[in-house]
Image (cartoon, rainbow, N blue to C red):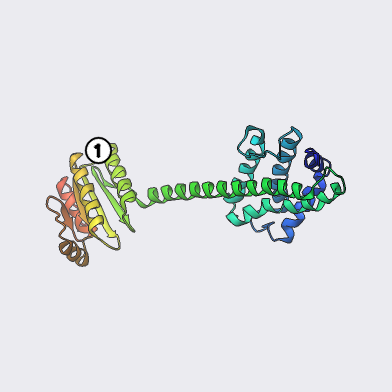
Amino acid sequence: MPMSFIQALIDSKGEEILEDWLATHHADGLTRRDLFSDAQGRQHAKTFFLALQSTLNRGADIDAFNLASDAWADVRAALAEVTRERVKRGVAPAEIAGFFLLLKYPLFDRLGAGAGTEEFSVVEQVSRLTRMIDAIAVQAMSLCIEERDRIIERQRTEMLEISTPVVDLWERVIAVPLVGTLDSVRAQEVMENTLGAIVDREADIVIVDITGVPTIDTEVAHHLLRTAAAIRLMGAECIISGISPRIAQTMVHLGVSTNGVTTRASLRAAVHDAFQRVGLTVVNAKA
C-alpha cells in the first residue's frame, strides 16, 4: 500500500468522514446536547479533523507516527483546544476519549476501497490508524485530567479565600471566623491572610473565632497556637474565641497548653474583651 493512501483518503473523503464521525457520536450518545448545542459539537469535531487533515497533507508520516513530534503540533493544539472546552462544560474523561476513538470507524469503513492491490494491506492500514487514533485518545485523557486538576485547584484556592475571611470589627480590631476543617494547607492560608491584614489594617487585636470548627485534635490545636504566636510576633494580641466546654475538655485531654494565649467561650465575650483593650465601651443607646 502506498504510504499516501490514508492521507489521500482523508483529503478526498474528508467531508463524508466528518459527517459519519458526527453521526457515530449521535448513535453512541456523545453529542451531549445538555452541555452544548449541535453546532458547538460539530465545531469541536471540525476543529480537530481539519487540523488532522492539514497535518497529513503536509506529509506527516503515519508509519513513524509520534504525536509529540513537531510535525503533529497543529493536531496537539486542536486536541488541547477541544478537550479543554469539553472539560469546562462538564464532559467526563471517558466520553472525551470516546469522542476521538469513534473516528476509527468511518475511516475503517473506507479502507476497503484500497483492497485488491498488491501493495495494499488492510491489516497494515488498520494498525496504523489504530495506533494514531489510540495515541490521540490517550493524549486527550491526559489533557482532560490535567485540565480537571487545574479546575479543582482553582476552586480549592477560591474556597480557601472564601472560607478564611478577615472582618473589620472596629478600628484596630479584626476577626477571623473559621468554619469547617482546619488542615495544614488551610492553616497556612489563615496565617498568611491574618498577618497580611494586621499590616494592612494596623490591627492591635485579632480575634480568631473557632465556633464553626467541628472538631479539635492535636494538629488543629497546634495550628491555632502557631497562628497566635505569629500574631504576637507581629505586635498584635490574639484572642481565640468559641472555646466550648467540649473543646476545652478535648484540649485538656490532649495536653495542649494555651499559656500566653487569651481564650474566650464566645465571640461576644471576645469582642467585649477586645474593645476594652483598645479603650472602647459599648453602651445601650436607649439607656
| Horizontal and vertical percent position of residue 79 | 64, 43
Name which residue lies at 28% across and 39% down: 201
Closer to the camera in the image, 104 or 170:
104
| Horizontal and vertical percent position of residue 120 | 82, 45
Q: Furthest residue to the left?
A: 259
Dividing the picture into quadrants, the one containing residue 58 is: top right
Name which residue lies at 41% across and 51% down: 159
| Left/right of residue 203 with respect to residue 159 in the rendered view | left
| Left/right of residue 116 with respect to residue 141 in the rendered view | right
Q: Furthest residue to the right?
A: 116
Q: Amino acid at mark 1?
A: Glu
Q: Secondary structure at mark 1?
A: loop
Dividing the picture into quadrants, the one containing residue 183 is: bottom left
Quarter of the picture containing the C terminus is: bottom left
Name which residue lies at 67% across and 47% down: 131
Quarter of the picture containing the N terminus is: top right
Residue 167: tell me if it is visible.
Answer: no
| Left/right of residue 1 with respect to residue 210 in the rendered view | right
Residue 81: tell me if it is visible.
Answer: yes
Closer to the camera in the image, 51 or 72:
72
The mark total stands at: 1
| Horizontal and vertical percent position of residue 113 | 86, 48
Classify mark 1: residues with Cα within 10 Å, few (<14), some (14-19) or many (20+): some
Name which residue lies at 27% across and 50% down: 175
| Horizontal and vertical percent position of residue 74 | 66, 36
| Left/right of residue 276 with respect to residue 6 in the rendered view | left
Closer to the camera in the image, 148 or 89:
148
Which residue position is annotated with label 1?
202
Q: Is residue 112 above or below residue 63?
A: below
Q: Is residue 86 above or below residue 2?
A: below
